[in-house]
Image (cartoon, helix red, strand yellow):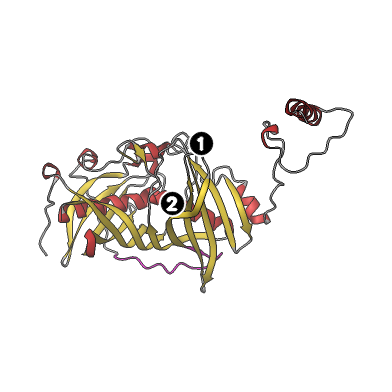
Amino acid sequence: MNTKFTNVIKMNNVQEMLAGGKRRVVAAGALGILDEEGCKRAPPQKFPTDTAGAMSEPDRFPFVDRIITHDPYSEIVTECTLSTERFPFLADHSIDGTPYHPGVMAMEMFAQSALLLYPMCILEGFSDVKFGLPIKLTKEEARIRIKAEFSGQDHNSLFIRCHLESDLVNSKGEIFGEPIIHHEAMVRLLKEGAPRDAKIPFTDSPGRGKASFQPSFIYDRFFHGPRFQVHGGLIKGITDQNDLGADGVALLRTQLPNSQLFKDEPALLESLPMLIEACFQNAGLVAMEVDDISSLPIGIEECEVLKIPAKRDELRVRSYRRGQEDDGVTIHDAVVFDRNQKPIVSLTGLRLKGMAPVPDELRFNLKRKKK
């Protein structure tokens, strides 16, 4: 049959189907380029009542664009498309002009997916966090997925194993090979009504000292832009027996130089990622001072999310360098405290990987009292 004539028949049928008419038109399979207006859609998904109720809250789950698969209380796969337009914080977490998706926001994605799997629970913390191949936005958008699956439970906690993955895409936009797994963690959810039994690495708090080294000192040494400048300044150097550390000021989200992390605000974040980031940066400053290296986080043994700080709180962060492993990896513990010296977030076994030596002109030493 003449190709031009065939195309005319196809277009007449499409117009009949989309615009209405006296004849019935049956479409089988995918319409391909004939469905430019997106009339053919996947059937609506059905979720348990508690999951559907959680999704209906407008401020929650800013990293969940859609749920790809959902086996209630067993497994969920969610998808998110990253861009600097939707997530402005990405622009302030860039290296040489290329945005990198922050590890703390990957942890937040894990928390959100786990809570969609068990909406009746609350976030307790994370275990065995591993930061692998970073997610770079070399194009305007990057599509990623979170897979969360039930792994086990004890008397008060559920354990949800999560990983973040993306597809390999060639220059034609075609997907090939197996997905890349970037980051992994075990999310711990507290059962409804269960008590916390969190263990924090230390209880000695920083007190209420003021910053001796201002944020400008810190961000002359770090790459972070205003939305990720979570450190309000170094207060002093400290010691715990033979372990060196530092006290600093941790900033609430509302206290950041630029607090608009998302295009659509407000956006509720479950895991207090900016306070976890303050721990990363405080420990990074200690590694910079002691080891003369600039570092990035590669893992956390245990992270506890203990309480939500008051809206106008004044927070402090304390971290200790606990040791060193091969390949320039240093080990740290860190805790963020509120103005009443109660712990908010704690990290045990934070591992930082040395990436580059600190230039001579940026090296520094903190004064410490001898015990």
Residue 94 percent across, percent down from the top left: 34, 39
Nearest to the eye among marks 1 and 2: give it: 2
Residue 348 percent across, percent down from the top left: 32, 64
- The stretch in magenta equals 187-202
Whether residue 123 is visible, yes or no, is yes
Up-down: is 232 above or below 153? above
Towards the viewer: 274 or 90: 90
Residue 21 percent across, percent down from the top left: 86, 27
Residue at which label 2 appears:
106
Residue 89 falls in image quadrant: top left
Q: Is residue 319 magenta-colored? A: no
For residue 84, the mark is: none
- Of label 1 and label 2, which has the lower sequence position? 2
Q: Residue at x 73, y 25 (%)?
A: 4
Towards the viewer: 326 or 177: 177
Q: Amino acid at mark 2?
A: Ala
Dot 1 crowding, Cα within 10 Å, few <14, some 14–19, many 20+ = few
Real-space Cα separation, disc 1 to disc 2, in angstroms: 19 Å
Q: Is residue 197 magenta-colored? A: yes
Up-down: is 187 above or below 60? below
Residue 182 percent across, percent down from the top left: 42, 54
Q: Secondary structure at mark 1?
A: loop
Q: Secondary structure at mark 2?
A: helix
